[in-house]
Image: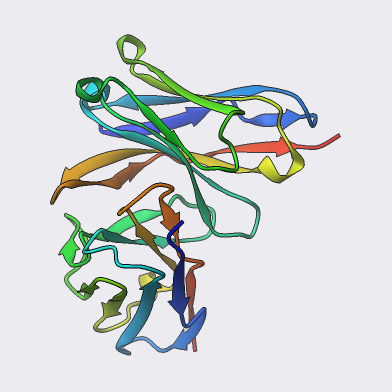
Amino acid sequence: EVQLVESGGGLVQPGGSLRLSCAASGFTLSDHYMDWVRQAPGKGLEWVGRSRNEINSYSTEYAASVKGRFTISRDDSKKSLYLQMNSLKTEDTAVYYCARDYYDSSNYYLDLWGQGTLVTVSS
Amino acid sequence: DIQLTQSPSFLSASVGDRVTITCRASQGISSYLAWFQQKPGKAPKLLIYAASTLQSGVPSRFSGRGSGTEFTLTISSLQPEDFATYYCQQLKSYPLTFGPGTKVEIK
C-alpha cells in the first residue's frame, strides 16, 4: 500500500528539540521530492520545508519561520524522511504532516499525505 | 513572498448547489496552483493541480480554472461528503504558501 506514516510527536519544553519521522511505503522515496507542512490548532496550513530527490542531491528549502532551527533529512535505505526541530518555540505547536510530491507540468505537487503527528511546545 | 487570499472565507450551501471558491495571488504564478480539501481531524487531500488538472480518483464535479493571479475551484453539485475546508496553494516560488482556507458548511 502506498502510504506515509509520521511519528515522533509529543510534548516538549520551549528551547527543546524533537525529531519527527515519516515512514514511506509502496513507492521509491529517493525518486520523490518530499515536504513537511504543519497546522497549528484551529488554524490553516503552513509549509515548513522541502527535500528534493536524489537526482537533485537532496537539496532543501525552508520557510523563514523555521530556517536555521529545523533540518530535513532522509534515509532512503530506511525509507524514511526526518524533521529535526531545535530551539522549539510555543508557536511551533502544530500537527506536522509529511507529504510526497508528484511531478507534472514542470512543477511538484503534494499528492500523498501522512496522517500527521502532534507536536506541543509548552512548559 | 507570494500571498494568497481566498473568498469567501465561509460558505453556507445546500446539497445540490453549485459552489465557487476564488483564490487570488499577490503576483503572477502562471498555473502553479493546487487545491486541497480537508475534513476535521484528517490530512489534506489533493483535488486539483496545475490549476485545472483533476487528481486521479477525485469526482468530476470538482473543477479548477485560472492562471496568473486569479483562480477558481467549482463544485458543480455539492454532495454531503463535500462539506469541508478548502485551501489553495501556490508552487511558483519559495516559500510555498497556502491560502487561509474556505469552510463550506451545510445550510
Residue at screen point 31% across, 9% down? A77
Compared with B20, A118 (above or below) is above
For the question of whether residue A21 can be seen, the reply is yes
Based on the displayed image, in which of its 4 quarters is residue B46 positioned?
A: bottom left
Residue A71 position within the rendered picture, expressed as x and y whole percent measured from the top left: 52, 25
For the point 75% across and 36% down, the residue is A121
**Residue B84 appears in the picture as rendered:** no
Give the left or right position of residue B73, taking residue B1 as reference. Answer: left
Q: Quadrant of residue A117?
A: top right
Residue lying at 19% horizontally and 22% vertically, measured from the top left: A55
Left or right: residue A87 versus residue B4 is right
Place of residue A41 in the rendered image (x, y in percent of width and height, measured from the top left):
65, 53
User: What is the x, y in percent for residue B50?
Assistant: 20, 59
Q: Looking at the image, which is closer to me, A72 or A118?
A: A72
Residue at position x 77%, y 27% from top? A15
Measuring from the top left, give residue A83's x and y in whole percent. 51, 26
- Which residue, as the protein is rendered here, is positioned at the far left? A105
Left or right, A88 with respect to A50, comes to right
Foreground pick, B1 / A101: B1
Image quarter of the C terminus of chain A: top right
Q: Residue furthest top?
A: A77
Q: How is the image coloured?
A: rainbow
Where is B9 relative to A13, above or below?
below
